Amino acid sequence: MRAQYAVPLGITAAGAAGLLYSVGFEARSFRLRRVTVPILPPGMRPLRVLQVSDIHMVSGQRKKQRWLRSLAGLRPDFVINTGDNLSDPEGVPEVLDALGPLMEFPGAYVFGSNDYYGPRFRNPARYLLEKVQGRHGLNGNPPVVGALHNPWEDLRDGFDSAGWLNLTNVRGTLKIDGLEIELTGLDDPHIKHDRYERVAGGPSDSADFSMGIVHAPYLRVLDAFTADGYPLTLAGHTHGGQLCLPFYGAFVTNCDLDTDRVKGLSTHTSAGRTSYLHVSAGCGTNRYTPARFACPPEATLLTLTGRE
């Protein structure tokens, strides 16, 4: 009888240990990814861009708040926030406090669906099922009727008062040491709030450098940015797959992007043009699925250098 129960008990124990590790350790094991992108016009000085994404702040997450505040020590040229700051309607003051030191630097932001709407419990197994069925994230999802409203207006006002650019379906410009950096942003495609027609037309001739900013890297958006001639697009949303298999990688991306590009630097081709794409794995999780496995939370310092 003991042998009969040994295997299932061993599997249960291994599963419990994995859950404890993914929730108690890895989800709090914050990392900084460093990436070099050879993309600037020849002769232009390097630019250091800090990307933060998918903070998903829940009230009381002190370690995450301390780590975010510490990123100001990197002294980037500017900061890009690619959305999903909230996972708790009470979390706005803590997001603004944690990002306060970073808001001393020039910056810009877009919102994700979780900035607008509170999270709902969802069985994680549904993500894998939808992937197998080929339905996962193909077109994004409209807001759920009756979804909990997050106080995104307070978050917006805090970012705006610090001088960060709101890139909600608009273009913006940062002045960095005499350089004109053009940022073209979209609202979240995951809930079909993106309106590319409002910003179409490609980079301005007057800008020293231009790039696209969006929360969720849906292919329709990447196609548009690339076809219009933007050399780089920054996005988040995927959580890097969040629950990954070592030596295999991510199972899902939560959008129609392929899993090979679920996080980090890659390229995208559309209309005969190729541009760089950087997808942040983010530094948080939905409050109802507070686990990461083989995919630690991160922010990224991108060093943009001259084209080779």
Image (cartoon, helix red, strand yellow):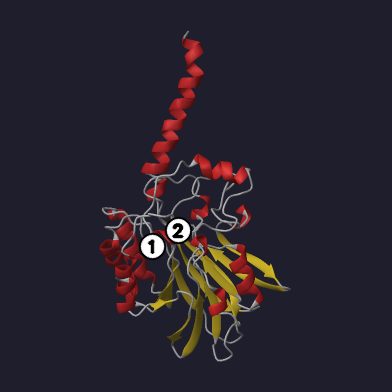
Q: Which of 165 and 280 is in front in this view?
A: 165
Spatial CA span between label 1 and label 2: 9 Å
The x, y position of residue 123, in whole percent, is: 46, 41
Task: Tell me which residue sits at (48%, 88%) in the image.
Answer: 179
Residue 245 makes an appearance in the image: no
Q: In this view, does 297 lie above or below 93?
A: above
Residue 56 makes an appearance in the image: yes
Q: Which of 159 and 62 is in front in this view?
A: 159
Residue bearing the label numbered 2? 143
Q: Element under label 1?
A: helix
Q: Element under label 2?
A: loop
The x, y position of residue 11, in whole percent, is: 49, 26
Tag 2: Cα neighbours inside 10 Å, few (<14), some, or many (≥20)? some
The x, y position of residue 91, in whole percent, is: 29, 59
Q: Do the residues labelled 1 and 2 touch (CB within 8 Å)?
A: yes
Name the quadrant of the C terminus.
Answer: bottom right
Q: Nearer the viewer, residue 246 or 80?
A: 80
Residue 20 falls left or right of residue 202: left
Task: Tell me which residue sits at (47%, 75%) in the image.
Answer: 48
Residue 161 occupies quadrant: bottom left
Residue 225 occupies quadrant: bottom right
Identify which amino acid the numbered label 1 is placed on: Tyr
| Mark carried by residue 116 | 1
The x, y position of residue 163, in whole percent, is: 34, 80
Q: Is residue 203 above or below residue 260?
A: below
Identify which amino acid the numbered label 2 is placed on: Pro
Task: Tell me which residue sits at (59%, 68%) in the image.
Answer: 221
| Mark carried by residue 270 | none
Task: Tell me which residue sits at (48%, 79%) in the image.
Answer: 170
Residue 95 occupies quadrant: bottom left
Q: Which of 151 and 161 is in front in this view?
A: 151
